[in-house]
Amino acid sequence: MTIITGHDEQGPIGCTCQSFYSVSTDPPLISFSVKKTSTTYPRIRQTGRFAVNVLSQAQQGVSNQFARKGADKWAGIRWGSTRAGNPVLEDTLMWLDCESWAEHDAGDHLIVLGRVIEISPATQPVREPFLYFQGRYRYLHPDQAP
């Protein structure tokens, strides 16, 4: 799971996103998908930049909080900023700071491409990733063989 974040004149903005992946290494591009009905993404689009926060399995509550509409998504959330000014959440697996690259229509979603301009330091502690699959949260257990 990821949280897409940005910052505009109204303050920090963000939304939960379950579809995120690497697209290219040269140039460094990533992609995420967002519903066209999102009320958060238009504000992020206007800034021309965003951060991708990759959640750890300990952050289910954070994912739920950012998925809610009409609530204060930032209540009780600890965060810092990238050099470009995008919010990055504490205790994530990692984060990527991006400039908007392109946007493509995809049915009831938009496919957003971002050019990576900064990556979180490699000194962040290693944690287990937090996943969403078939309508449920999932966890990886590295000690269990397939």
Image (cartoon, rainbow, N blue to C red):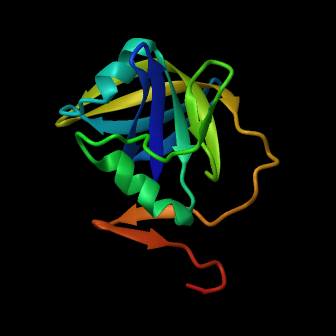
Relative to residue 81, is residue 38 drawn left or right?
A: left
- The residue nearer to you, when weighing 134 against 25, is 134
Label count reads 0
Q: Vertically, is 120 above or below 105?
A: below
Task: Please say if 133 is above or below 105.
Answer: below
Q: Is residue 91 left or right of residue 19?
A: right
Residue located at (59% from left, 36% from top) = 88
Q: Position of residue 16 (x, y in %)?
A: 38, 46
* Quadrant assignment, res 87: top right
- Quadrant of residue 111 within the rendered picture: top left
Residue 84 shows in the view = yes
Taking depth in this image into account, of 79 and 111 the one nearest to the observer is: 79
Closer-to-camera residue (77/93): 77
Q: Is residue 68 left or right of residue 3?
A: left
Q: Position of residue 140 (x, y in %)?
A: 55, 73
Q: Position of residue 134 (x, y in %)?
A: 30, 67
Q: Is residue 18 visible?
A: no
Judge from the rendering whether residue 50 lies leftward or rightward of residue 65; answer left or right. Answer: right
In the image shown, does 49 or 75 lie closer to the viewer?
A: 75
The extreme right residue here reads: 123
Q: Residue at x 43, y 71 (%)?
A: 138
Residue pictured at 28% horizontal, 42% vertical = 71
Task: Name the quarter where the C terminus is drawn.
Answer: bottom right
Name which residue lies at 50% across and 72% down. Answer: 139
Q: Which image quarter: residue 103?
A: top left
Q: Where residue 83 sits: x, y (%)?
A: 68, 21
